[in-house]
Image: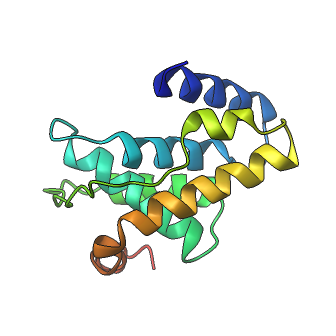
Amino acid sequence: MTPQEAFDELCAYTLQRGDAAFIHQHVVDAFAAQQADANTKPIKITFALVGLYLLIEKRWTGKQAQRAHMQMARRKHAWPTFALPRDRGAITPMDVLAAPAGAERDAAIHRWCREVWAAYSGSHEAVGALLREHGVL
């Protein structure tokens, strides 16, 4: 199974849940940040890092992160370029998918998010500043 196939299955899993916290957003953000490359648009990386910041640093739900994304997108903006770390965590979408559905898989999603966010440690301050600049924090 490829990372993309595992991500697609995780998306199906999280979207079927219909949970109020919208854990799906965390899956989207972790995957985007972990898989980004030189061809990835700055807005995609920015929003992924924003979502991870809000989850890990502020304990926001996926629904709250989604609202922050919408608030930030209202303004036309030249999105920053973030350095892409070589190592973006050992946890993969396949590892997350291997966890039993329910609380264990949700916990695996959160571990994955923490690991990907930690890999971008050099960008943490800039992401926080961007959120303050946009009035999210």
**Image position of 105 with respect to 7: above or below:** below
**Image position of 44 with respect to 100: above or below:** below
Task: State how the image is colored.
Answer: rainbow
**At 67% across and 24% down in the image, what residue appears?**
12
**At 68% across and 47% down in the image, what residue appears?**
23
**Front residue (pair 104, 131):** 104
Q: Is residue 134 visible?
A: no
Q: Is residue 120 visible?
A: yes
Residue 46 point in image, percent of width and height: 31, 56
Q: In which quadrant is the N terminus drawn?
A: top right
**At 83% across and 48% down in the image, what residue appears?**
104
- Count of numbered labels shown in the rendering: 0
**Image position of 99 with respect to 114: above or below:** above
- Say whether residue 108 is left or right of residue 123: right
**Corner quadrant of residue 61:** bottom right
Q: In which quadrant is the C terminus drawn?
A: bottom left
**At 73% across and 33% down in the image, what residue appears?**
98
- Say whether residue 74 is left or right of residue 25: left
Residue 49 point in image, percent of width and height: 39, 59
Residue 94 point in image, percent of width and height: 60, 32
Residue 99 point in image, percent of width and height: 77, 39
- Say whether residue 43 is left or right of residue 24: left
- Say whether residue 19 is left or right of residue 65: right
**Corner quadrant of residue 134:** bottom left
